[in-house]
Image (cartoon, coloured by chain):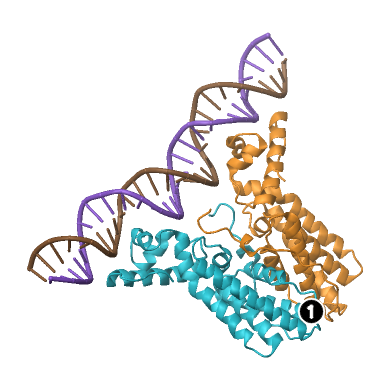
Chain colours: A cyan, B orange, C brown, D purple
DNA sequence: GGACAAATGGAGGATGCCCTCCACTTGCCT
DNA sequence: AGGCAAGTGGAGGGCATCCTCCATTTGTCC
């Protein structure tokens, strides 16, 4: 995103390793991983992290920049699709899949980065693009009339609530949920569903004290 | 739940005020409220909390005992309903509503209390009862055949992902989600939906550092 | 090769949380 | 009324987290 310019080569290497470790750990554990953990996994000290990213939030922003761009691209692609329902469905499926396999995604996506206006801009463009997709799907009579833009926020929140012990299970669960909701969103109602996954409710939140 | 017996009257009063404050704060803020906060709102010192409840988990268990019993009762009532779909729907609607207006509910419900076996027993009875309800609704042809018990875990997780700035909005959102999913669960597909609420995605998770 | 700024790492400051300790107070029983 | 166990509150121990400081190392340019 921002300047990674004029860095010494060792610093540059460390920087990319930090971002990679951060992406991995955020995805696996959520945004709660400690800076020390990220530092250890990148093979550097904490000071190096803070030299490169003044705050944890900045690191989060950098780590998820790619994903947010990807979301925007997904919407852009869908806008080029001539089949309105297909486009609508594709966006929901892809974004929810990204959210399902990455425990940090929801937090990063929902978090307003005070300075990273580029990402905010991307997000709002994606949102407007998706609004357009919904309009088209309604116009073609495939999306139910009472669908609201807030319904996708609802969907994202709901999908964000899904947790499982493996990314595969989480993805399966997410797919099922999205399938169910797409089914409910259709003006008529008939589409086959993804299979039901095995879930354990107590994955959803850790016990209060084990924090 | 367990002994509140042979307490001096002032201690008894304090105890009930602690539990009330805990319920209120857990509902409003989630399980993360600090013990100090709960103590302040009950007008007692922290030591009093810990004298009454050896650990925060124990306080959580006590605070939510009523709700878990209520859930079990909801299932029990539904089992007495002759209309299978109605019973099925009623349980989901009521439990999800409880979950929507109480930010601590999901955590408390999902958390395995090491000692409070009574609650665990209630929960598993409720789960078995609900399984029976699903069976009946399938038998009557109203619930789709490929519905799994894991689908209600899925629903609870999804519903648990919903957050809003007021309990009213959260409840509205939850109702909409449940309506959509019930619609998707029906063997045929046709029921009117609750209205769409206004939601803001960034309520779902606080930024990483503002913890 | 040698100088020098850039880069580094780990100790530790600040904060916030759960929970404990203990000197003090207060209701209860006779 | 008076003794005493039950009850209380707030300071602080232990731990985890984000972030800073500074003595030391390391790449780069002449």
Report x, y in % for residue B93: 80, 64
Residue C21 shown left or right of residue D9 in the figure? left
Q: Is residue A196 visible from the viewing direction of this image? A: no
Task: Tell me which residue sits at (67%, 66%) in the image.
Answer: B157
- Number of numbered callouts drawn: 1
Could you tell whether A25 is left or right of A170 in the image? Answer: left
Residue B148 in view, yes or no: yes
In-front residue for pair A57/A106: A57
The extreme bottom residue here reads A82
- Outermost residue on the right side: it is B82
Q: Residue at left 66%, top 63%?
A: B200
Query: Callout 1: few (<14), some (14-19), or many (20+) C-alpha neighbours within 10 Å?
Result: some
Residue D3 horizontal side relative to residue B20, left or right? left
Residue B15 drawn above or below residue B73: above
State the SS at label 1: loop
Q: Position of residue D30 (x, y in %)?
A: 13, 71
Instruction: Give the percent coordinates (x, y) of residue A86.
Output: 68, 87
In percent of width and height, residue B92 lies at: 79, 65
Tell me the chain of label 1: A
Give the camera-side residue of B11 and B17: B17
Residue B91, quarter of the rendered image: bottom right
Where, by quadrant of the figure, is residue B111 drawn? bottom right
Q: Nearer the viewer, residue B193 or B45?
A: B193
Pointer 1 residue: A144
């Amino acid at each position: 995103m921002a300047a990674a310019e004029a860095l010494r080569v060792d610093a540059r290497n460390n920087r990319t390793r930090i971002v990679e470790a951060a992406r991995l750990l955020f995805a696996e554990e959520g945004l709660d991983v400690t800076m020390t953990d990220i530092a250890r996994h990148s093979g550097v000290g904490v000071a190096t992290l803070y030299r490169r990213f003044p705050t944890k939030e900045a690191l989060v922003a950098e780590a998820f920049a790619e994903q947010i761009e990807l979301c925007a691209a997904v919407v852009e692609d869908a806008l080029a699709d001539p089949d309105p329902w297909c486009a609508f469905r594709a966006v929901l499926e892809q974004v929810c899949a990204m959210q399902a396999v990455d425990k940090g995604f929801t937090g990063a996506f929902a978090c307003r980065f005070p300075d990273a206006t580029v990402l905010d801009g991307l997000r709002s463009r994606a949102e407007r693009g998706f609004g357009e997709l919904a309009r088209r799907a309604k116009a073609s009579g495939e999306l139910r009339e009472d669908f609201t833009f807030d319904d996708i926020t609802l969907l994202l929140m709901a999908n964000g609530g899904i947790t499982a012990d493996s990314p595969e299970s989480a993805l399966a669960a997410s797919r099922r949920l999205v399938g169910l909701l797409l089914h409910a969103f259709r003006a008529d109602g008939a589409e086959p569903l993804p299979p039901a996954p095995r879930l354990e409710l107590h994955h959803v939140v850790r016990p209060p004290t084990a924090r």
